[in-house]
Amino acid sequence: MSLTETDRELIASAIEAISRRYRNDWQEVGAALLTRSGRRFVGVNLDAYLGRMAVCAEAVALGQVITQLGEAGIETIVAVRHPKPHETDREVRVVSPCGACRELIFDYDRGARVLVPGPDGVEGVRISELLPNKYSRERVL
Ligand SMILES: [Zn+2]
């Protein structure tokens, strides 16, 4: 799936969110989410001294949606990573969601589209493509 103008705006929103709130070792990833009703939400990750308390940017963005709208449909979601101060590549780039976020995104909208880095640049893929054979209570073999 190629990128639409809406996808580019979503990426720009994620970049803006993390660029505004970047804090080395604490806030390094931004996410933007387009709901099925066409509203856009952003979030940044919450790192923590106690690592298991850390929360990904995608989860924060989804939490905003649930809190403010009470709906969870995810049309498209994207995460971007801000470089650390010592990195020479200063570009904020699209990153793939971690395994836990793949589970979360799938649980809230199994038809969600995710923007990920591909061989020819950023591309849109279905969450089911990123999480084949997902664990499910519904599927008993
Ligand atoms: Zn994650």
Image (cartoon, grey):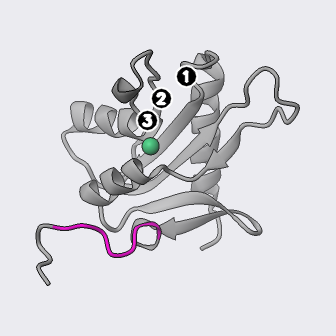
- Residue 12, position in %: x, y? 64, 40
Q: Are marks 3 and 2 in contact (CB under 8 Å)?
A: yes
Q: Which residue is mark 1?
A: 27
Q: Which residues are magenta?
A: 130-136
Taking the spot 68% from the left edge, 31% from the top edge, the residue there is: 82
- Residue 102, position in %: x, y? 40, 56
Taking the spot 52% from the left edge, 69% from the top edge, the residue there is: 125
Residue 48 circle label: none
N-terminal of the pair, mark 3 or mark 1, is 1
Quadrant location of the N terminus? bottom right
Q: Are marks 1 and 2 in contact (CB under 8 Å)?
A: yes
Helix, strand or loop for disc 2: loop
Residue type at tag 2: Asn
Residue type at tag 1: Gln
In the rendered view, tell whether residue 8 sits above or below residue 15: below
Report whether the residue tagged 3 is closer than 8 Å to ligand 1. yes
Q: Work out how far the residue at label 3 is from the one at label 2, CA to CA, in angstroms.
A: 4 Å
Is residue 36 in sight in this rendering? no
Is residue 120 on the magenta stretch? no
In the rendered view, tell whether residue 70 sits above or below residue 98: above
- Residue 141, position in %: x, y? 14, 84
Q: Which residue is mark 3?
A: 56
Query: Neighbour class for label 3 at 10 Å: few (<14), some, many (≥20)?
Result: many
Out of 41 and 5, give the one closest to the viewer.
41
In the rendered view, tell whether residue 123 sits above or below residue 52: below
Taking the spot 50% from the left edge, 51% from the top edge, the residue there is: 97
Residue 45 circle label: 2
Residue type at tag 3: Cys
Q: Are marks 3 and 1 in contact (CB under 8 Å)?
A: no
